[in-house]
């Protein structure tokens, strides 16, 4: 039996009177690549933030299960958080060099002699030549690649990605997709928020569709695209949904 | 006068630097953590506290001098310390004047850092202390401005140090109080010479800070 990594029960996130997320039940198993798709404002990033344990949900329970520990936003220790890494939709880089940005996660863990790993991570996102560049001078796409590299270099067990290829050209997007596929092969649990359903199809083992905060579909990738349960999923996949 | 730099003038300039550096070090030790805390903590009455800090940034030095004088005078609550008309009293008054400035500048510099940064470094495994240090590092230009402003306000201050220090020759006389005294005596040349030394000290210190700013501005 594959161990469970995430368990969600009756999760709701509200801001004032507005419910932005409503997930009655969800489980993620170790090593899965789960893609969250849906229109803008559907609650995808909110769900990812909750899964990153950056905030507790307004109601319900989200737990991360690692090494027989049940971790929530309330009891997560720094050691627990260090099992995860997240790439944000709008990455904020530290005003240091690209190299130092990639090194940051390792330095806060006290890993000083990791030059090889840092250079390897920079090379993986084709940023070796800009290693010494001031991060504030990087373009949006370059910053995005550094954000991916600084998340991957810490070798997380759970990798959370919010639109990691949104600012990238097709070639670089493919590079990042290959890195995600490598993570999948290595057994890392990946949660990927994307607008691009083709990317979800290429990378994910399971796809979730969120619409107006509701979890409309939760299916294995093949079923999601070929025989979804909800008619809205079929319309979304066909591009027939107005949003 | 300047070129000969007699022993008394050197002693006065040295005392000015001593008071300024001591007061600035204490103000920074209190002001940077307090400013970062005010910027980052969620606490009730934060607006009121912020208003108090901003008001403190404009404290009239002579009023601070008067209050410190009353507190340190023999009948005052801190009279037993015996600090009145000493360098310690001058440092105390200067700390009261400069600390709100450092707190206010630190607070606004930390608030100007992208609020998402804290969350993003947390998501990379930073501890709460490492999160705060990352934000302070991002705010480093503002913090340097605070240092420069604090240094300038302390070294050029005259009213408070005159009241609590007493401008005693060989003990509490500093450049600003010496300038006042020499001007009153009609020794304008000497007053101007002391003023030039004061400006030169401020220039050299600010130059060092600007060079440090250039260094921290470059990525490692």
Image (spheres, coloured by chain):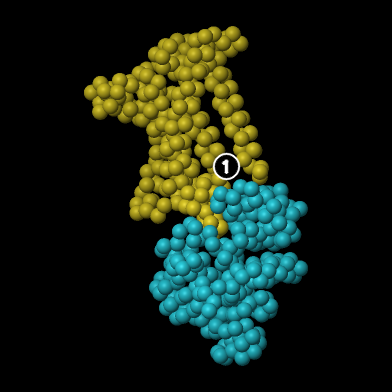
Q: Is residue B60 left or right of residue B194?
A: left
Instruction: Return the chain for callout 1.
Output: B
Q: Is residue A218 left or right of residue A120?
A: left
Q: Residues within 10 Å of mark 1 (few under 14, many from 20)?
A: some
Which quadrant of the figure contains the C terminus of chain B? Answer: top right
Examine the rendered structure and indicate whether residue A26 appears above or below residue B219: below
From the top left corner, tell me how far across and down residue B12 is, in percent: 48, 15
Image colour for chain B is yellow
Q: In this orientation, does residue A135 appear?
A: no
Give the residue displayed 40% in from the left and 73% down from the top: A59
Image colour for chain A is cyan
Give the residue displayed 71% in from the left and 48% down from the top: A132
Which quadrant of the figure contains the N terminus of chain B? Answer: top right
Q: Is residue A238 left or right of residue B114?
A: right
Q: In this orientation, does residue B91 appear?
A: yes
Q: Secondary structure at mark 1?
A: helix
From the top left corner, tell me how far across and down residue A58 is, in percent: 41, 71
Task: Kindly indicate the quadrant of the structure image that contains residue B212.
Answer: top right
Give A92 or A189, whichever is nearer the viewer: A189
Q: Is residue A74 left or right of residue A132?
A: left
Give the residue displayed 54% in from the left and 11% down from the top: B189
Pointer 1: what residue?
A: B141
From the top left corner, tell me how far across and down residue A80 is, in percent: 49, 61
Task: Kindly indicate the quadrant of the structure image that contains residue A9.
Answer: bottom left
Examine the rendered structure and indicate whether residue A18 appears above or below residue A98: below
Give A150 or B7, whichever is nearer the viewer: A150
Q: How many marks?
A: 1
Examine the rendered structure and indicate whether residue A198 appears above or below residue B92: below
Examine the rendered structure and indicate whether residue B154 appears above or below residue A8: above
Give A199 or A219, whichever is nearer the viewer: A219
């Amino acid at each position: 039996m594959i161990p469970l990594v995430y368990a969600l029960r009756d999760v709701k996130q509200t801001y004032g009177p507005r419910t932005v997320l409503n997930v009655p039940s969800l489980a993620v198993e170790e090593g899965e690549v789960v893609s969250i798709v849906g229109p803008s404002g559907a609650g995808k990033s909110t769900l990812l933030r909750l899964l990153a344990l950056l905030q507790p949900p307004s109601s319900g329970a989200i737990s991360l299960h690692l090494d027989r520990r049940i971790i929530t936003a309330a009891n997560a220790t720094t050691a627990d958080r260090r099992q995860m890494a997240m790439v944000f939709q709008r990455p904020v880089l530290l005003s240091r060099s690209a190299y130092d940005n990639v090194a940051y996660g390792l330095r806060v863990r006290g890993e000083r002699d990791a030059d090889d790993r840092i250079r390897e991570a920079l090379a993986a996102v084709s940023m070796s030549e800009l290693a010494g560049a001031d991060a504030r001078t990087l373009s949006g796409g370059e910053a995005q690649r550094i954000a991916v590299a600084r998340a991957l270099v810490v070798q997380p067990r759970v990798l959370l990605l919010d639109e990691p290829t949104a600012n990238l050209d097709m070639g670089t997007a493919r590079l990042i997709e290959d890195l995600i596929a490598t993570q999948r092969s290595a057994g890392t649990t990946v949660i990927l928020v994307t607008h691009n359903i083709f990317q979800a199809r290429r990378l994910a083992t399971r796809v979730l569709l969120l619409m107006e905060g509701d979890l409309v579909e939760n299916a294995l990738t093949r079923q999601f695209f070929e025989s979804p349960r909800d008619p809205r999923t079929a319309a979304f996949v066909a591009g027939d949904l107005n949003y | 006068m300047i070129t000969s730099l007699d022993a008394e003038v050197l002693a006065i300039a040295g005392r000015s630097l001593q008071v300024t550096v001591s007061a600035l070090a204490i103000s920074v030790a209190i002001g940077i953590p307090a400013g970062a805390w005010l910027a980052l903590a969620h606490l009730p009455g934060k607006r009121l506290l912020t208003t108090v800090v901003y008001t403190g940034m404009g404290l009239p030095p002579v009023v601070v001098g008067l209050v410190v004088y009353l507190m340190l005078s023999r009948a005052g609550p801190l009279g037993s310390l015996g600090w009145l008309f000493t360098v310690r009293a001058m440092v105390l008054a200067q700390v009261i004047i400069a600390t709100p400035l450092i707190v206010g500048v630190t607070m606004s510099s930390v608030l100007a850092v992208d609020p998402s940064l804290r969350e993003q470094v947390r998501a990379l495994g930073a501890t709460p202390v490492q999160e705060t240090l990352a934000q302070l590092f991002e705010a480093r230009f503002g913090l340097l401005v605070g240092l420069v402003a604090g240094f300038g306000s302390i070294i050029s201050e005259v009213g408070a140090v005159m009241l609590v220090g007493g401008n005693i020759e060989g003990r509490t006389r500093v450049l600003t109080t010496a300038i006042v005294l020499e001007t009153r005596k009609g020794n304008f040349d000497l007053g101007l010479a002391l003023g030039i030394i004061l400006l030169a000290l401020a220039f050299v210190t600010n130059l060092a800070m600007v060079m440090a700013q250039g260094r921290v501005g470059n990525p490692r």
